[in-house]
Amino acid sequence: KNLGLIFDLDGVIVDTAKFHFLAWKKAAKEVGFELTEELNEKLKGVSRVDSLNKILGWAGATVSEEKFNEMATNKNADYLTYVDKMTADDILPGVEAFIRKAKSKGYPIALGSASKNAPKILKHVGIYDLFDAIVDGNSVSKAKPDPEVFVIAAQKLNVPVANCVVFEDSEAGVEAANNTHMLSIGLGSEDVLSEADHVFPDFTKITLEFIEQQANKK
Ligand code: BG6
Ligand code: MG
């Protein structure tokens, strides 16, 4: 099969999931809510607006539209202070080597992220040019677990949806991949990502040969 490889950004390529968590934790405090790591799993892969809606729901808080926008803007400003300090060291172990190997074998590579900051972050850590297509929070209308982001990525790569492999660290993202019958590879904990076709702690444990075998079987 001519495979297309689609990578989520936050928590898969770069170690930014922890920065989103810190920034949301601070925002939640403002409405008197203590965001735990466990609940934070429900925010991973979820758009900025949807994330804030979830937090307000958990907090049982209602805010004006103005306050909502202010909270979202502040959260992003907070998040970007962490992003500004990032370097190539914040690229997660093994992922860049994996992508380069896949490219050398001719597989097209896409980004499929909910983040509006995706291009900025990829440029910041110097790997923007690795991608043949970038689909991010600026170009999708339906958030994960809707598969729109991955379906558009497949179209941009000119690869059939059924030939695509998705790498995800979030429940919502794994669900999105499964919803469109792409091979879903979870990065993180088995407990959180039990719906994924396969789960690995990080890219140092994944070989391209394994992915090729699994994708060709599917
Ligand atoms: C996802 C993250 O990749 O992007 C979420 O997992 C985040 O935590 C979402 O809320 C939107 O990101 P941004 O950068 O546009 O606020
Ligand atoms: Mg993610």
Image: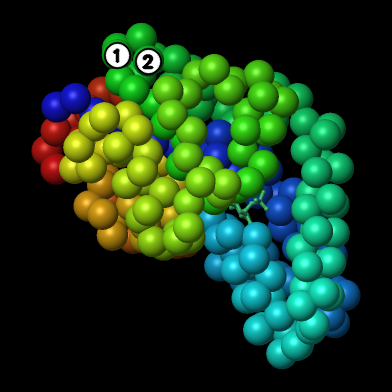
Three-letter code for the amino acid on which mark 1 is drawn:
Gly
Q: Quadrant of the C terminus?
A: top left
Q: Which residue is drawn at 55% across and 61% down?
A: 46
Residue linked to disc 1: 106
Label 2 packing within 10 angstroms: few (<14), some (14-19), many (20+): some
The residue at the point 61 percent across, 38 percent down is 118
Alpha-carbon span between mark 2 and mark 1: 5 Å
Residue 96 to residue 180: above or below: above
**Residue extending furthest top?**
104
Q: Residue at x 84, y 32 (%)?
A: 85
Left or right of 146, for residue 91: right
Q: In which quarter of the image is residue 129?
A: top right
Q: Quadrant of the N terminus?
A: top left
Return the x and y of residue 62 as percentages of the image width and height.
75, 88
Instruction: Residue 213: name its quadrant.
Output: top left
**Secondary structure under the numbered disc 1 in the rendered image:** loop
The answer to whether residue 131 shows anywhere in this view is: yes
When the figure is inspected, residue 1 is found, relative to residue 195, above or below; the finding is above
Q: Measured from the top left, where is residue 69 in percent x and y?
A: 78, 68
Residue at mark 2: 103
Q: Could you tell me if the residues under marks 2 and 1 are in contact, i.e. CB atoms within 8 Å?
A: yes
Q: Which amino acid does label 2 sit on?
A: Lys
